[in-house]
Image (cartoon, rainbow, N blue to C red):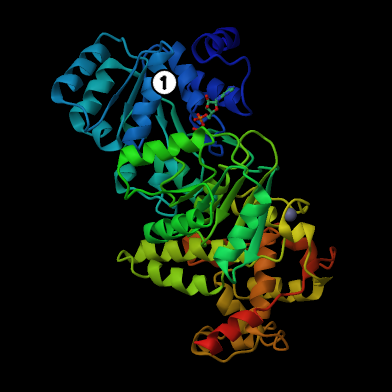
Amino acid sequence: MTDTLLQHLKTYFGYSSYRPGQLEVIQAAMQGTDSFVLMPTGGGKSLCYQLPALTLPYVTVVVSPLMSLMKDQVDALKANGVSAEFINSSLSREEILQIYARLRQQELKLLYVAPERLLQPQFLDRLSELGVSLIAIDEAHCISQWGHDFRPDYMALSILKQRFPSVPLMALTATADGATRQDIVQQLGLQQHYEYVGSFDRPNIRYMVQEKFRPLEQLVAYLKQQDGLSGIVYCNSRRKVDELAAQLQERGYSAAAYHAGMDSTARGSVQDAFQRDDIQVIVATVAFGMGINKSNIRFVVHYELSRTIESYYQETGRAGRDGVNAEALMLFDPADIGRIFHWIDQEENEQRARVGRQRFQAMAAFAEAQTCRRLVLLNYFGEARQTACGNCDICLSPPKQFDGSELAQKALSCVYRVGQRFGMNHVIEVLRGSQNQKILQYGHQQLSTWGIGQDYSHDFWLSILRQLVHFGFLQQDITQHAALKLLPAARPVLRSEQSLQLAVPRLHASSTNKEKDK
Ligand code: ADP
Ligand code: ZN
């Protein structure tokens, strides 16, 4: 079987070897085992279902939320001689009927569908009659309301397991923290599944955060250092993109704007010019990057704070695809935090606003981190690590360290005493001996940890707790109002078996000054 697969890998895809994880996932599918595949973008997820589809007897159904990506993949497959089609609302009735006919003739190896189409009763009936070998669910995090891109359409996919109990399901995603991951497995009802979790580390990207004072001057100084190399500057709004692109052009930079408000021809020509190195810098909203395949992007600047670590990671991940050194620079103004919280609060759906706030909190904590940025990112994605990377701003010019063992013990035992059911603010209030209503309501003034941290300010403790999260001693459970929970690594610290160096919190004198200026 492995020989045939390898043969097909060469013939249809032109590759001579597998990327990490691919073979194992492919074998699971061939054996009829469910699987969960977490690989970063560009890791090679599509091959995991495309290759088995070629040898399995019946059609492989691929559920995908994005019409444009469906078409791109199907076009690429057809160009390689694989019989694949997609069905979505962009097709006419005639076209759909033709595809049904080919399906009946067992001519199709792969069929891409949007979830709402797949779940139409007649469609499900037709598939059960004709037989299905594998169902792949791309962007599987869309099924989870803890994910950053929840789509109600996806939720109904949980019936697939009942409808097709003997057909293996393959759930694929690039973005899933622990809570989302568990939720995907549960919602889809994966049975004794094979799980592949790829590394999210991009060692050649140097992560850097600069406090934002005069952003335009800072950016220009940075571009000077880059000396003509290609890069992207991300902003949060179209207005800002247009303004900044114009400012850079005025200063003689080869820069262009890119956002979803521009028509597709204009966007296409900017993208092509960038690809050909005719434009050095693209100033863009998050709309830029989906289809881009440029491997020598040397830097990605975040002119404004992202709303989630997922999107930050995705955007910075466009740098250095060729494996050569690249940089990710974020300009960070602590005042942006309040602004973004305000936007998030405009969200009407209370549940979504809550998840949005919690995800954004993690992003803000990254920007304020006193610990290795890479550790923060990787621990966020559930890739537990405790050794600093040596290739981020914190590692390269570290903040002052002190022996934080005792403070860490106080904080960790306080998390334990409150039953691992409360978030950072409450834990800090308990540590600082507050008598606020919530504390009295739960009787937390009687805990042994109440008031043991009163010598330090709220912000000081916030920094300590964040460091403990970033180092993988604590985790914030987004399914429970970001309640702090102890992770296994906390145990030796609590038992005084391990000492701990923490960064002296760099408390923002600057942000207090700003308040005064207003
Ligand atoms: P993902 O969906 O995980 O973002 P893709 O499936 O789009 O990633 O694959 C990313 C790129 O890697 C594509 O250009 C693809 O052709 C390439 N690729 C995938 N598998 C292999 C392989 N085994 N060898 C070489 N290139 C591969
Ligand atoms: Zn580092």
At label 1, counting other C-alpha atoms closer than 10 Å, the crowd grade (few under 14, some 14-19, many 20 or more) is: some
- Cβ of mark 1 under 8 A from ligand 1: no
Q: Tell me the residue at 81%/71% (across/down).
A: 400
In the picture shown, does residue 430 fall above or below 128? below
Would you say 352 lies left or right of 5 here? left
Would you say 503 lies left or right of 101 here? right
Q: Nearer the viewer, residue 423 or 190?
A: 423
Q: Tell me the residue at 56%/70% (across/down).
A: 333
Residue 323: quadrant of the picture: top right
Q: Nearer the viewer, residue 189 or 197?
A: 197
Residue type pointed to by label 1 = Ala
Would you say 396 lies left or right of 237 here? right
Q: Tell me the residue at 55%/64% (across/down).
A: 216
Residue 444 on image: x %, y %? 59, 84
- Label 1 belongs to which residue? 76
- Quarter placement of the N terminus: top right
User: Where is ligand 2, by quadrant?
Assistant: bottom right
Residue 402: in sight, yes or no?
A: yes
Q: Nearer the viewer, residue 268 or 21?
A: 268
Mark 1, secondary structure of its residue:
helix
